[in-house]
Image (cartoon, rainbow, N blue to C red):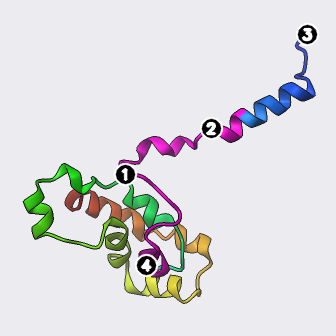
Amino acid sequence: MGLDLPSESELDSIVKVVEGTRPTQDHISVSKMSYSDHQKARAMVGGISTPRVWATLTLPSTLFVCKAVENYKFDGPTTTVVENMRPEARRNMENGNWHPLNSALVRYLLKIWVFLSLRTG
């Protein structure tokens, strides 16, 4: 086709750009995400980060009137996500009965996220 293949140095440059690019899902987060915060809630599900990722989709408390935030205190969106999971699923995650990939894919998280997106901040 008459197209030259990239040189070794060009390939290295391309790899560096790709590795330095943020994942495409970053744009959906409303709040900041960290893999090291909310350890108490994450420990309740065997340490997986899926509930934390879902929690970043909820509205931050700064968007609400202070009086509402004071009257309706909660541990945070990650804990709310975890506490609203089916007890048997959470027990399997916490006890290590489920592999972390199975835990991360548990279908109840979608239901919980829809519910939480309508009522928490």
Q: What amino acid type should be assigned to the residue bearing mark 2?
A: Thr
Quarter of the image holding residue 118?
bottom left
Expressed as whole percent of the image width and height from the top left, the position of residue 74 reads: 23, 72
Image quarter of residue 60:
bottom left
How dense is the environment of label 1, judged by Cα within 10 Å: few (below 14), some, or many (20 and up)?
few
Residue under pointer 1: 31
Q: Is residue 110 left or right of residue 24?
A: left
Residue at image point 31% right, 72% down: 80
The residue identified by callout 3 is 2
Could you tell me the amino acid type at mark 4?
Lys
For the residues labelled 4 and 3, the Cα–Cα distance comes to 58 Å
Residue labelled with disc 4: 40
**Residue identified by numbered label 2:** 21
As drawn, is 27 to the left or to the right of 84?
Answer: right
For marks 1 and 2, give the CA distance: 19 Å
- SS class, disc 1: loop
Pointer 2 or 3: first along the chain = 3
Quadrant where the N terminus lies? top right
Instruction: Examine the structure image and report whether residue 22 is included in the region drawn in magenta.
Output: yes
* Left or right of 12 on screen, residue 16: left
Image location (x, y in percent) of residue 85: 37, 76
Tell me whether circle 2 and circle 3 mark residues in contact (CB < 8 Å).
no
Question: Is 18 part of what is drawn in magenta?
Answer: yes
Q: Reply above or below: 34 against 107.
A: above
Find numbered disc 2 in the image and state the secondary structure of the residue it sits on. Answer: loop
Q: Amino acid at mark 1?
A: Ser
Q: Which residues are magenta?
A: 17-44
